[in-house]
Image (cartoon, helix red, strand yellow):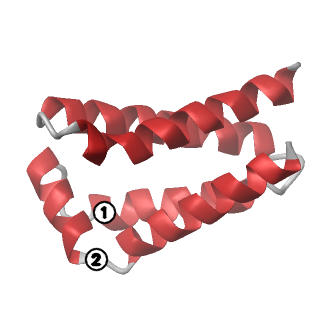
Amino acid sequence: MFVLKIVLAVAFVVAGGFKIFRAKPMVDQFKEFGLPNFGVQLVGTLEVLGAIGLFVPSLSLYATIGLIILMIGAVFNHLKTKHPFKTLAPALILGILSSILLFLMIN
């Protein structure tokens, strides 16, 4: 479970960092989704905070649930805008891995 947390934390810190620093592909994607301009940095901040929260015992369950919700939203937006599978795959994979982590945490 610890290795899965590390993998997820690294992935979410990297993905969140791109959003926090407003990487052009992320900004363009959020515009295409029809989300507000501040949404890029907000989602990036939530991803980084979620990654950190995975390692705080009193927050790890909530952080995992929050990351799952973010990935459901990401997959939904990719589907809504009819992006190819390769574009939505990272969000889908991170959502599945986060769901596996949640399952392991509650069992």
Within 10 Å of disc 1 (Cα), the crowding (few <14, some 14-19, many 20+) is many
Residue 39 place in picture, x, y as percent: 29, 58
Quadrant the C terminus occupies = top right
Residue type (three-letter) at the residue carrying disc 1: Val
- Give the alpha-carbon distance from disc 1 to disc 2, as whole Å: 9 Å
- Residue pointed to by mark 2: 23
Residue 34 visible (yes or no): no
Q: Quadrant of residue 75?
A: top left
**Residue 83: image location, x then y, percent:** 16, 40
Q: Is residue 72 above or below residue 57?
A: above
Of residue 106 and residue 58, the one placed in the foreground of this image is 106
At numbered mark 1, what does the secondary structure look like: helix, strand or loop?
helix
Q: Quadrant of residue 85?
A: top left
Estimate the x, y position of residue 6 in percent, counting from the top left.
75, 58
Q: Nearer the viewer, residue 102 or 59?
A: 102
In the figure, is residue 76 to the left or right of 8? left
Give the residue number, with chain letter if any, for mark 1: 40
Query: Secondary structure beneath disc 2?
Result: loop
Q: Residue furthest bottom?
A: 21
